[in-house]
Image: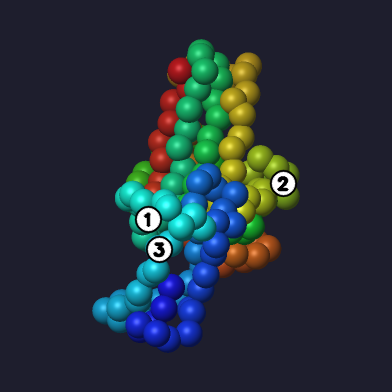
Amino acid sequence: MYSSCGSAELACNNNGSTCGVGSVISNIQLTGGVPVYIRVASNSSTATGGFNLNVNQVFNLQFGSIGPGTIGFALTGGPQLGTYYLAISFAAGNFPNGWLYGIDILIPDLVAQINSGWPYVGGLDYCGGTIFGPVGGLPSGFSIWTVGLATAGPLGIPTHVTPPVAYTIP
């Protein structure tokens, strides 16, 4: 990534991605309306073809299940090697306009979840994500309201926030 043709590199990654095939540049501070130039190349002198370019990946929270009474989640698009916090409320409150980024969670529940650690609090991998579960033994039809928060370092003011999610366990 360059600020102009022939300028010094702003960032580079030569196939050092552990996020699948290709390279990843993350946590770059850019200014809207200011162009940057991205050079795409191959280590092979004979390689040809297309490529995908993903820009402004959104921090996302997705729940899933493998059957009745099971739940798992995946967080993607967070800061590389950051820390996540998953806030879970068991009451709908003013969803999706609650006081904590769209959910209404009681302060004692918030404190208890943070102090409990994993799976409410944990590390994000090199790709800015994490996967939990699925786990079983939960009551079918039970609903949760949740939001994912992340920071580039230890827990602090969130730099990444997922949209609030409502999920009912199948």
Q: Nearer the viewer, mark 3 or mark 1?
A: 3
* Residue position for label 2: 117
Residue located at (61% from left, 29% from top): 133
Measured in 3D between alpha carbons, the distance from the residue under mark 3 to the one under mark 2, in whole angstroms, is 41 Å
Measured in 3D between alpha carbons, the distance from the residue under mark 3 to the one under mark 1, in whole angstroms, is 13 Å
Residue located at (65% from left, 65% from top): 153
Toward the bottom, the furthest residue is 7
Judge from the rendering whether residue 128 lies leftward or rightward of residue 93; answer left or right.
right
In percent of width and height, residue 22 lies at 49, 52
* Amino acid, disc 1: Asn
- Quarter of the picture containing the N terminus is bottom left
* Amino acid, disc 2: Gly
Measured in 3D between alpha carbons, the distance from the residue under mark 2 to the one under mark 1, in whole angstroms, is 32 Å
* Residue position for label 3: 40
Mark 3 or mark 2: whose residue is earlier in sequence: 3
Mark 2 or mark 1: whose residue is earlier in sequence: 1
Residue located at (46% from left, 76% from top): 29
Mark 3 or mark 1: whose residue is earlier in sequence: 3
* Residue position for label 1: 54
Disc 1: CA contacts within 10 A as few (<14), some (14-19) or many (>=20): few
Residue 72 visible in rendering = yes
Judge from the rendering whether residue 97 lies leftward or rightward of residue 13; answer left or right.
left
Disc 2: CA contacts within 10 A as few (<14), some (14-19) or many (>=20): few
In percent of width and height, residue 117 lies at 72, 46
Between 1 and 83, the one nearer to me in the picture:
1
As displayed, is residue 22 above or below residue 71? below
Disc 3: CA contacts within 10 A as few (<14), some (14-19) or many (>=20): few
